[in-house]
Image (cartoon, helix red, strand yellow):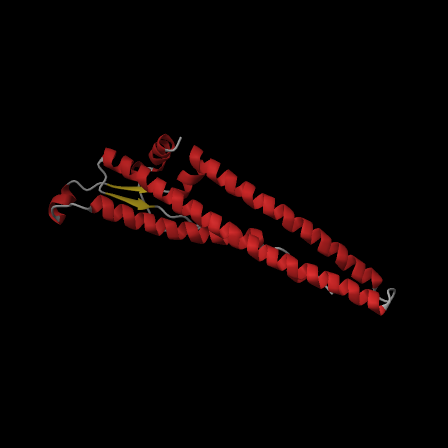
């Protein structure tokens, strides 16, 4: 019996969950900002005369702002505590697997079957725990993204209103969805949004 198939994939799965939830949040943010900041235009012709557009990277805001770093650190701590439990389960499974291999041809059939049963029960328990922890972490990640996307939207709106921007677009990233192909550095509001975000979330 081999354990190659039960190696924990939680780290990879968690990165995928984070990217997916962040991508969904970013699309929602772009839609809300567009609707909110474009609202009230008297006409397309007059709007074009004073049109100002900016871009922002919500992921950078989350990762570089003080409040965002605190939230990410808490999520990392939450994941690390559960990963420690998973690692202990994996160590026990490896130990049982070693006993099984060393006992082949040496242990009595009843003893070998008893050991195989122990391994099978432990493996099933391990798989359930990994699944539960991944689901819990996915929920935590979604809650964080939902909460902070709303806060980032508020900070972005404030910066946009202060600077007279009619539209602010999510830049996107290679890890999620590339929304903006090109922009001038002068219209990137990310650093201003980080400062406003920290001011609002001390």
Nearest the viewer among 14 and 169 is 14
Quadrant of the image occupied by residue 164: top left
Q: Residue at x 31, y 48 (%)?
A: 30
* Residue 112 x %, y %: 81, 65
* Residue 15 x %, y %: 51, 51
Most distant residue in the bottom direction: 109
Q: Residue at x 60, y 55 (%)?
A: 129
Residue 180 visible to an observer of this rendering: no
Which quadrant would the N terminus be assigned to in this image? bottom right
Residue 93 visible to an observer of this rendering: yes
Q: Is residue 77 left or right of residue 66?
A: right
Nearest the viewer among 187 and 38 is 38
Q: Residue at x 48, y 36 (%)?
A: 70
Using the image, determine if residue 120 lies above or below residue 150: below
Nearest the viewer among 50 and 38 is 38
* Residue 59 x %, y %: 41, 43
Q: Is residue 129 left or right of residue 109?
A: left
């Amino acid at each position: 019996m081999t354990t190659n198939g039960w190696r924990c994939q939680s780290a990879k799965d968690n990165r995928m969950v984070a990217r997916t939830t962040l991508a969904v949040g970013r699309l929602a943010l772009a839609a809300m900002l567009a609707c909110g900041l474009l609202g009230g235009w008297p006409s397309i012709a007059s709007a074009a005369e004073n049109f100002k557009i900016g871009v922002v990277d919500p992921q950078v805001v989350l990762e570089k702002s003080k409040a965002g770093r605190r939230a990410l650190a808490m999520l990392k701590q939450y994941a690390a505590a559960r990963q420690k439990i998973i690692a202990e389960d994996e160590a026990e499974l490896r130990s049982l697997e070693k006993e099984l291999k060393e006992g082949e041809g040496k242990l009595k059939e009843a003893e070998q079957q008893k050991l195989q049963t122990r391994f099978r029960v432990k493996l099933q328990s391990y798989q359930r725990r990994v699944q539960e922890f991944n689901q819990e972490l996915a929920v935590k990640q979604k809650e964080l993204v939902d909460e902070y996307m709303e806060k980032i939207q508020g900070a972005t709106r404030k910066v946009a209103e202060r600077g007279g921007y009619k539209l602010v677009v999510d830049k996107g990233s290679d890890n999620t969805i590339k929304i903006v192909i090109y922009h001038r550095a002068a219209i990137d509001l990310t650093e201003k949004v980080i400062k406003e975000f920290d001011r609002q979330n001390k």
